[in-house]
Amino acid sequence: MNDDGVRELVEVMAKALAEYPEAIVVKEIVGHQISVIELRAAKDDLGKIIGKEGRNAHALRTILNAAATKLRKRAVLEILE
């Protein structure tokens, strides 16, 4: 997995959950010590991506942290409207 891999990973997972995968936009903002992954989705898909009681969002963040740790990076997932 390359440096762009965590962004791609989040994008693939979000598109798999979404009803409108073409509306998924994932941007990575690289800071000095941490990367912020911004995930934007169609309003109708936000509920699916976040999931009941935030379970899907929590799972996405867990996988993101595991992948980032493997790359010796720190990453945070922000789900935006």
Image (tube, grey):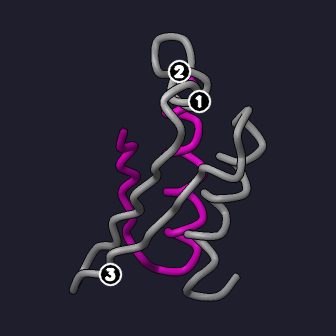
Residue 30 - label: 3
Amino acid identity at mark 1: Asp
Q: Earlier in the sequence, mark 2 or mark 3?
A: 3
Vertical relation: 26 (above or below) 20: below
Q: Quadrant of the N terminus?
A: bottom right
The CA distance from mark 3 to mark 1 is: 26 Å
Amino acid identity at mark 3: Val
| Left or right: where 24 falls relative to 68 | right
Instruction: Say few, some or many: other residues with alpha carbon within 10 Å of mark 1 (under 14 / 14 to 19 / 20 or more).
Output: many
Report the mark closest to the observer, 3 or 1.
1
Q: Secondary structure at mark 2?
A: helix
The residue lying at 70 percent from left, 39 percent from top is 20
| Left or right: where 29 falls relative to 71 | left
Q: Secondary structure at mark 3?
A: strand
Q: Which residue is mark 1?
A: 45
Which one is in front, 63 or 20? 20
The CA distance from mark 1 to mark 2 is: 5 Å
User: Is the Cβ of the residue at disc 1 closer than 8 Å to that at disc 2?
Assistant: yes
Report the mark closest to the observer, 2 or 3.
2
Q: Furthest-top residue in view?
A: 52
> Where residue 67 sits in the image (x, y, percent)?
60, 65
Instruction: Say few, some or many: other residues with alpha carbon within 10 Å of mark 3 (under 14 / 14 to 19 / 20 or more).
Output: few
Amino acid identity at mark 2: Gly
The residue lying at 44 percent from left, 69 percent from top is 27
Q: Which residue is mark 2?
A: 47
> Where residue 26 sits in the image (x, y, percent)?
51, 62
Q: Quadrant of the C terminus?
A: top left
Q: Secondary structure at mark 1?
A: helix
Task: Report the magenta residues as a range.
Answer: 55-81
Residue 5: in magenta span: no
